[in-house]
């Protein structure tokens, strides 16, 4: 039975279109612009609307059906975000900075659970705002890093590869001056190593590696995310400076992998965090068979959860898997995994990084 058109007023539709066209940051003049809008809607709201749906909504493609209620709901959320950002943008800068600092004020959130998805959603909007407003970020990075909640709900949740080298790294340097935990110190030092790696700064890379080695204590427990970052940085550093250590480190990776729980709960332990970052290290050191084996374990032995699906993290693992197969000469198998990847899913904090990997994979797919 054919679907009946939804009852959505033309006034509401026209209001959404008008706001996005007149006040949004994405120019919508031609059909091809709808792809950029679809991607931006996903970055801002975390919800996906297809390019073809956007084309129908803006009248580039004709359709006899009204937009779905889900489409209207997501577009209204996007519209409200545009209005909010413009309101913030026209406000006094110092007032905006105070608002953000107050948002992360520990007195407001003494008992906040770090797995709280609602607070994460609010923090995600703050992170998107800060990445797009570096002047504001520079002014509030110190109080943000001094705050326990700021460290936990900004710096630890949103290490952003796209801005890390530009300005975010300064926040991690301040973070280290105030963080007292072993795990936090290890995490921030790994991020600063990556910043130096992205910049191809050998002096700072070696300095960060020394800090990591001095800090590391195998008798202490690290969250799988941080432990994975530790091996990510160690693999890269050994490949660049101490190749004789590489085989031993790879053995450690697979030995450590066996001890990672397959049924973790809370604080992102549901996801194969350790494997995710260790795979990136193996990619950079060109150990493709090991990369295939580790990514395969992550994809086969861990249940997949919605949160990490919409962030594209499983797609990232498929990229590593397919790249490894491609480099090993197994083109047909690589193509099979390539077809499973939805590049539109990639999370904003590492979107360009993984799009570059995706495009490298795509260029070799026949």
Image (spheres, rainbow, N blue to C red):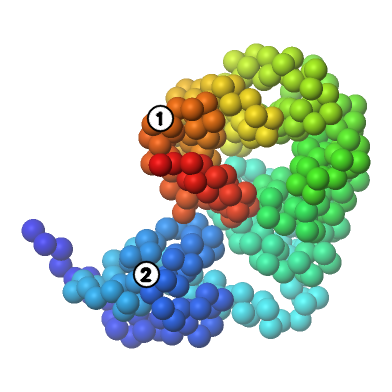
Q: In this view, does 332 lie above or below 161?
A: above
Quarter occupied by the N terminus: bottom left
Q: What element carries label 2?
A: helix
Q: Which residue lies furthest to the left in this view?
A: 1
Numbered tag placed on residue 54 in the rendering: 2
Numbered tag placed on residue 307 in the rendering: none
Quarter occupied by the C terminus: top left
Return the x and y of residue 98 as percentages of the image width and height: 78, 69
Q: Write the residue at 55% across / 50% down.
A: 355
Q: Quadrant of residue 348?
A: bottom right
Task: Depth check: give the residue in front, 358 or 74.
Answer: 358
Q: Quadrant of residue 55?
A: bottom left
Q: In which quarter of the image is residue 283?
A: top right
Q: Is residue 241 visible?
A: yes
Task: Depth check: give the residue in front, 94 or 312.
Answer: 312
Whichever of labels 1 and 2 marks the residue nearer the N terminus, that label is 2
Q: Write the residue at 79% across / 18% down.
A: 245
Q: Write the residue at 81% across / 45% down.
A: 200
Q: How crowded is mark 1: few (under 14 residues within 10 Å), some or many (20 or more)?
A: few
Return the x and y of residue 139 as percentages of the image width and height: 84, 67
């Amino acid at each position: 039975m054919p679907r009946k058109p939804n009852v959505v007023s033309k006034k509401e539709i026209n209001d959404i279109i008008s706001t996005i066209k007149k006040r949004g940051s994405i120019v919508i003049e031609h059909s091809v612009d709808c792809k950029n809008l679809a991607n931006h809607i996903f970055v801002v709201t975390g919800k996906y609307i297809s390019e073809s749906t956007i084309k129908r909504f803006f009248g580039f493609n004709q359709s006899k059906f009204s937009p779905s209620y889900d489409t209207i709901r997501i577009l209204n959320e996007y519209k409200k975000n545009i209005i909010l950002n413009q309101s913030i943008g026209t406000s006094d800068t110092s007032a905006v900075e105070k608002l953000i600092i107050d948002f992360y004020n520990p007195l407001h959130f003494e008992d906040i659970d770090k797995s709280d998805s609602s607070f994460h959603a609010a923090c995600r909007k703050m992170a998107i705002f800060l990445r797009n407003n570096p002047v504001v970020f520079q002014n509030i990075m110190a109080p943000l890093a001094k705050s326990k909640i700021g460290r936990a709900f900004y710096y630890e949740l949103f290490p952003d590869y796209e801005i890390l080298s530009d300005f975010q790294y300064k926040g991690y340097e301040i973070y280290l001056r105030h963080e007292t935990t072993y795990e936090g110190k290890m995490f921030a030092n790994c991020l600063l190593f990556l910043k130096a790696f992205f910049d191809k700064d050998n002096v700072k890379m070696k300095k960060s590696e020394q800090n990591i080695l001095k800090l590391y204590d195998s008798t202490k427990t690290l969250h799988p995310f941080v432990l994975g970052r530790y091996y990510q940085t160690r693999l890269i550093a050994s490949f660049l400076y101490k190749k004789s250590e590489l085989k031993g480190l790879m053995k450690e990776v697979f030995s450590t992998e066996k001890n990672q729980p397959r049924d973790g709960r809370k604080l992102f332990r549901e996801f194969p965090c350790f494997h995710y970052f260790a795979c990136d290290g193996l990619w950079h050191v060109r150990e493709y068979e090991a990369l295939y084996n580790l990514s395969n374990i992550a994809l086969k032995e861990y249940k997949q959860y919605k949160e990490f699906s919409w962030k594209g993290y499983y797609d990232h693992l498929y990229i590593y898997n397919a790249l490894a197969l491609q480099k090993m000469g197994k083109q047909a198998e690589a193509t099979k995994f390539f077809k499973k990847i939805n590049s539109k899913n990639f999370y904003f904090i590492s979107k360009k990084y993984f799009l570059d990997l995706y495009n490298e994979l795509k260029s070799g797919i026949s």
